[in-house]
Image (cartoon, rainbow, N blue to C red):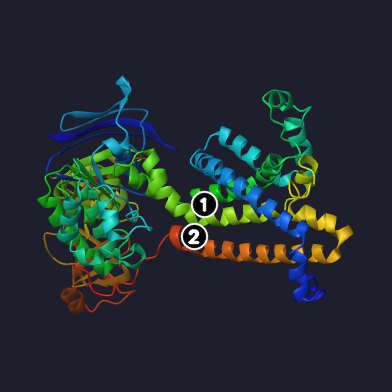
Amino acid sequence: MALRLDFTHPLRSFVAAVRLTVPRGTTTALVGPSGAGKTTVLRVIAGLLRPREGTLTVDGVSWLDTSRKHELPPERRRVGYLFQEYALFPHLDVARNVRFGARDSGLADEMLDRFGIMHLRHARIRDLSGGERQRVGLARALARDPDVLLLDEPLSALDAHTKDTVRLELHQHLRELDLPAIVVTHDFEDAAALAHTIGVVVEGKLLQTGTAGELVAAPADPFVATFTGATLLPGTAIGAREGLTEILLDNGATAWSTEPGSGRVHLAVYPWDIALAREQPDSSLSNHLRGPITSIVPIGDRTRVRVGGIVAEITAASARRLALTEGDTIVASFKATAARLLRATPR
Amino acid sequence: MVAIFLRVPPGDLFAALGSDAALAAIVVTLETNAISMVLIIVFGTPTAYWVATRSSRLRDLVLTLIELPLVLPPAVAGIGLLAAFGRFGLLGGTMEFAGLDIAFTKVAVVLAVAFVASPFYVRTAVSSFEAIEPTLPDAARTLGAGPAKVFARVALPLAAGGLGAGAALAFARGIGEFGATIMFAGSLQGVTQTVSLAIYEQFDLDFDVALAISAVLVAVSAGVLLIVKLFSRWRSGSTSPIPFAPSSQPSG
């Protein structure tokens, strides 16, 4: 029991070609830069866009098969679609929005209740806050009793404060629903918080699919690495010694990685794998890059420090202990095991 | 405009309105314009929706045809209508055979007004259908609405303000119609003589009556413009992207 999609469709500057299986009760996030074709995937599933070629089955029922010229119109596909910015009907109140596509009014009332918006049922859409609108949109989508749930950037229209609460709520709802769900987002953190599986979409193709942990542990490509939060240092692998690869970085420094590599490479390192010190430490950390601090950004109890080309994330306490100020010269260190080597691909 | 109201005392103005010519003209105008407006709205609304939701070349062609009366001199419109429906016109023979003679009847007035006023409605209607946020019809489709239901329950209500404004503009243009009507329908008092034609005729016969009818037209036109403004305000409130209300309490 699952959603199975396989389609190709030419977009403005590339051809989108996506093959995707989403089992019932699981959530897949599609992440990637804007214009990568993420929303196209949702529109094909909903029937709002007919792909040049493709098949789509949901729980074994064919919704689309271009080779047989078979295509269910959108209104006959049972899809719960939460649009970006929610697409609520401004001329209808909250209850009428939720009832618009409801199987029956009982289910609509149940959703109003479940999302805690019963008291807003006579409210006009323009009077709702962002978080409230998101709940109305979700209630409306689920009142249709869908077989598939599609969420397009469900959190991007919210301010930072509301976003955290709504993300938690959304996470709980997604866990409770026994549906295949697809979330489109440009934010890796949102994807990691909401989905079981993350697919990175670039120029209409699924570049890599896996859990958030898998993508961070072994990014398949420099793009996936930066997307998951790594800093990339371009360089050239110049040789191997004692199981380590030696890389001459473009900034003149030398670095070591436990991963094999040759020729032009990107060294990817995550901010949480980097330690900062005033003087070069005498330790097993085999990579040390010295440089001036170009920025210090406190984020809650963490502090992000940019040293030369790389970003380190340390605890606020360490930042205070080191008494960092912009312009100071400092040493950023990371283990050879934390230095992932990725072949430089022209993009 | 002020001169129209000041030249004759208000009492005389009302008395002049009571004249046979003025009353007949007002009745003819209201009758014919009401029918024209019904025709314009009934045929114009679906046409406008069709144009607004297409992006083909055919759409541009249809739009050009719709807008043509806007730029045509009224005299050309009148000649065209005569050439089509007149006794010796393109369709005149067929219609005469069927016992219909349209030229110089009320039907001719209705056709002339509809021809000249329709672009004002259809053009505005196209813009207001186009102004609908495209995700709204999409959302309606995913919520189980077929194309007809999307039109009735989403497009029509959202475009209503614009449709009202367009109808008011078309009505204002219609009651002032002169050129096409006088050529195609003539100026027969009580049959085809509308207010504009009556002003022209009374201009020679009784200047006070001409003034009185003009005063009515000024009042009606001002009223219509006001209505258009009100519709436009309602419309901008209903279809432009709605900003979020400030969150009054932490959600959750």
Looking at the image, which residue sits at the far right?
Answer: B204
Q: Residue at x 62, y 62 (%)?
A: B224
Q: Give above or below for B151 relative to B15.
A: above
B181 lies left or right of B143? right
To the question of a shared chain for discs 2 and 1, the answer is yes
Disc 1 secondary structure class: helix
Q: Quadrant of the N terminus of chain A?
A: top left
Residue A232, given in percent of the width and then of the height, sits at 29, 52
| Chain of the residue that carries numbered disc 1 in the rendered image | B
Q: Is residue B1 visible?
A: no
Q: Are marks 2 and 1 in contact (CB under 8 Å)?
A: yes
Q: Is residue B122 visible?
A: yes
**Residue kind at label 2, given as amino acid type:** Arg
Residue A14, given in percent of the width and then of the height, sits at 40, 36
B151 lies left or right of B251? right
| Chain of the residue that carries numbered disc 2 in the rendered image | B
Disc 2 secondary structure class: helix
- Residue identified by numbered label 2: B235
Q: Give above or below for A296 relative to B48.
A: below
Q: Quadrant of the C terminus of chain A?
A: top left
- In this rendered view, identify the residue nearer to me: A43 or A211: A43
| Labelled disc at residue B128 | 1
Looking at the image, which residue sits at the far top?
Answer: A68
Residue A21, given in percent of the width and then of the height, sits at 19, 35
Can you tell which quarter of the image residue B209 is in?
bottom right
Q: Earlier in the sequence, mark 2 or mark 1?
A: 1
- In this rendered view, identify the residue nearer to me: A36 or B45: B45
Q: Give above or below for A257 relative to B208.
A: above
Can you tell which quarter of the image residue A96 is in?
bottom left
A32 lies left or right of A322? right
